[in-house]
Image (cartoon, rainbow, N blue to C red):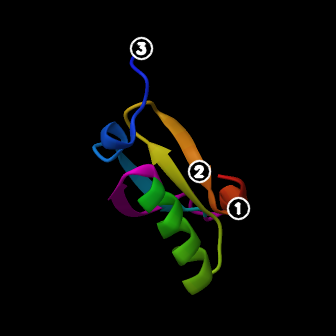
Amino acid sequence: MPEATPEGDMKLTYDIFRKFAEDGPIWIETVQGIEKCKSRLLDLVQRNPGEYFAFDPLHSRVVAESSKTQTL
């Protein structure tokens, strides 16, 4: 498998969702690149506190959560 590069990451898209206990996750937006994704999660939490997560649809996995963005 090829090694990830910053240039390759800019082509990857991530879907950002907000967690809601009763209704399940709600899609917020799609962003390009992991750095933009982490930055956007932090921005969302500051503007409208809540739980958010980023999903990588290519690899079918959660790549970041608002409660864990400090460690990314």
Compared across the picture, whether 65 is left or right of 8 comes to: right
The reply to whether dot 1 and dot 3 touch (C-beta < 8 Å) is no
Residue 68 visible to an observer of this rendering = yes
Q: Secondary structure at mark 1?
A: helix
According to the image, label 3 marks what residue?
1
Residue at 38 percent across and 42 percent down: it is: 6
* Few, some or many residues within 10 Å of mark 1 (<14, 14–19, 20+): few
Q: Quadrant of residue 12?
A: top left
Q: Nearer the viewer, residue 66 or 2?
A: 2
Q: Secondary structure at mark 2?
A: strand
| Residue type of the residue flagged with mark 3 | Met
* Few, some or many residues within 10 Å of mark 2 (<14, 14–19, 20+): many
Q: Nearer the viewer, mark 1 or mark 2?
A: 1
Residue at 53 percent across and 58 percent down: it is: 25
Q: Which mark is residue 13?
A: none
Residue at 52 percent across and 36 percent down: it is: 61
Query: Furthest-left residue in view?
Result: 11
According to the image, label 1 marks what residue?
70
Give the alpha-carbon distance from disc 1 to disc 2, as whole Å: 10 Å
According to the image, label 2 marks what residue?
64
The reply to whether dot 1 and dot 2 touch (C-beta < 8 Å) is no
